[in-house]
Image (cartoon, rainbow, N blue to C red):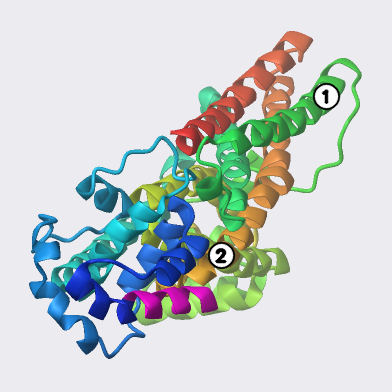
């Protein structure tokens, strides 16, 4: 950070020289070139230099706006918001951002850097882009929260034969997108690897990591199918037992200690009675329900934190992060809804509690957007989100996936049908189609 300050001072201080002879001294050129040898270095310096508000006194370079050298560059009254725009203005071509810059490149680019800093249009364009990113990010968070609540809409179709097959594929998609996002996107970004390795060679190694994880997962599943090796799974599944508490009569899912008062309140429909009913049910809600609520709030907050930071980097990066979160929220929240119902809440109350937990995503988004303005926080947010995504994908969603397969087999047994190896292989194929699709999508997004 200190050497960026040194470079900035050199740039600003040297323009009394540039104004008269358009050249830096040899010492200044060598010092700049020692710290800005590649386009990666220049990219980081350029963004910090343009967006920084720490330089208050720029009077020493005000006359640069009237310098003939700047007018000859054909960039007056034009903002150059990115490094590529700057290179295009100077016809500097390169196959890689890691290619070395020459002293001539530094000499040609340095006047444009100061001009861009003094150009108010650049500051306004940056502000507009920031608000645009926040607006699109807010819409994305809203869409994710709505997709999570659609679980309540499809509950009436849970007894359809195809319901669990489709849900199983969605859970597999969540496994693939979450794990792929963590390994292909978030963890590498925490170490700034994508900018240092513009040829994306790190993706090949990350893909081998995914293949290793997938190989062990397939080994376990094939052992269950052919060797009858069972795995102990603790999960809040989506079975009919959990969802059987759903009823048109909201009193059926309320603890017996409050049934009398609820019967009385059902005769007089009023807002106060509904609030009292909700408070009573929350007091009587089982520990599992409270764990789901608190865990969901923390989970959604970190999701929002990740999205806020990602959208401040770029809209494309934010949308890439939105995809795995949306894929994970739908099946995950459906399971949470089942646990809340089994904890003593009615359908409407469970949806309300789920929605309140989802609102923490908005808080996380605005906190992440604020921290996203400070570039030094980006790696820490990506590291936190990367660990969470990989953990949820492997330790949370895979047990959900296995549990869903067991429930499909249980339905066959209940309907007096035999559970054959062919059926188990079919279930595995449905689940793996989602996993492979999710991993493929995240890999292609990282590569292109």
Give the left or right position of residue 72, taking residue 160 as reference.
Answer: left
Q: What stretch is highlighted in magenta?
A: 1-11
Number of numbered discs overlaid on the protein picture: 2
In reply to whether residue 308 is colored magenta, the answer given is no
Helix, strand or loop under label 2: helix
In the rendered image, which residue does mark 1 sit on? 219
Q: Which residue is drawn at 54% across and 51% down?
A: 333
Query: Considering only order in the chain, which callout, 1 or 2, is on the residue closer to the N terminus?
Result: 1
Nearer to us of marks 2 and 1 is: 2
Q: Is residue 286 above or below residue 42?
A: below
Q: Mark 2 points at which residue?
A: 381
- Of residue 431 and residue 15, the one placed in the foreground of this image is 15
Indicate yes or no whether the magenta region holds residue 10: yes
Inter-mark Cα distance, 2 to 1 = 33 Å
Asked if residue 16 is positioned above or below residue 349 in the image, the reply reads below
Quarter of the image for the C terminus: give it.
top left
Inspect this view and state whether residue 334 appears.
no
In this orientation, does residue 446 appear? yes
Whole-percent x, y for residue 28 in the image: 41, 71
């Amino acid at each position: 950070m200190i050497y960026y300050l040194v470079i900035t001072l050199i740039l600003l201080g040297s323009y009394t020289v540039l104004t008269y002879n358009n050249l830096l001294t040899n010492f200044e050129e060598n010092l700049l070139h020692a710290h800005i040898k590649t386009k990666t270095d220049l990219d980081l310096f350029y963004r910090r230099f343009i967006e920084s508000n720490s330089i208050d006194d720029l009077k020493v370079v005000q006359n640069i706006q009237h310098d003939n050298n700047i007018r000859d560059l054909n960039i007056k009254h034009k903002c150059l918001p990115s490094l590529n725009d700057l290179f295009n203005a100077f016809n500097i071509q390169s196959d890689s951002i890691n290619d070395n810059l020459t002293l001539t490149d530094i000499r040609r680019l340095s006047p444009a850097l100061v001009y861009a800093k003094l150009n108010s249009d650049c500051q306004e364009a940056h502000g507009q882009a920031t608000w645009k990113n926040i607006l699109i990010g807010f819409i994305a968070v809203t869409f994710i929260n709505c997709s999570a609540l659609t679980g309540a809409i499809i509950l009436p179709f849970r007894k359809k034969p195809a319901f669990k097959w489709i849900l199983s594929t969605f859970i597999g998609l969540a496994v693939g997108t979450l794990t792929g996002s963590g390994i292909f996107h978030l963890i590498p970004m925490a170490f700034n690897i994508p900018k240092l390795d513009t040829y994306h060679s790190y993706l090949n190694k990350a893909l081998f990591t995914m293949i290793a994880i997938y190989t062990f997962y397939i080994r376990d599943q094939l052992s269950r199918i052919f060797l009858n090796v069972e795995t102990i799974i603790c999960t809040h599944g989506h079975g009919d037992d959990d969802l059987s508490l759903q009823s048109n009569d909201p009193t059926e899912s309320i603890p017996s200690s409050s049934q009398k008062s609820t019967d009385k309140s059902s005769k007089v429909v009023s807002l106060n009675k509904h609030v009292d009913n909700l408070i009573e049910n929350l007091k009587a809600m089982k520990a599992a329900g409270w764990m789901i609520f608190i865990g969901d709030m923390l989970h959604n907050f970190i999701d929002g934190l990740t999205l806020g930071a990602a959208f401040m980097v770029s809209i494309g990066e934010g949308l890439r992060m939105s995809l795995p979160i949306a894929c994970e929220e739908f099946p995950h929240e459906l399971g949470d809804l089942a646990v809340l119902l089994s904890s003593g809440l009615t359908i409407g109350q469970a949806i309300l509690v789920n929605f309140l937990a989802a609102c923490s995503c908005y808080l996380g988004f605005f906190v992440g957007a604020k921290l996203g303005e400070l570039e030094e926080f980006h790696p820490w947010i990506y590291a936190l989100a990367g660990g969470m995504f990989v953990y949820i994908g492997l330790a949370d969603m895979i047990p959900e996936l296995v549990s869903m397969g067991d429930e499909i087999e249980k339905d066959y047994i209940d309907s007096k049908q035999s559970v054959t190896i062919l059926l188990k292989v079919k279930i595995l194929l449905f689940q793996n189609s989602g996993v492979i699709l999710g991993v493929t999508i995240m890999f292609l997004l990282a590569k292109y």
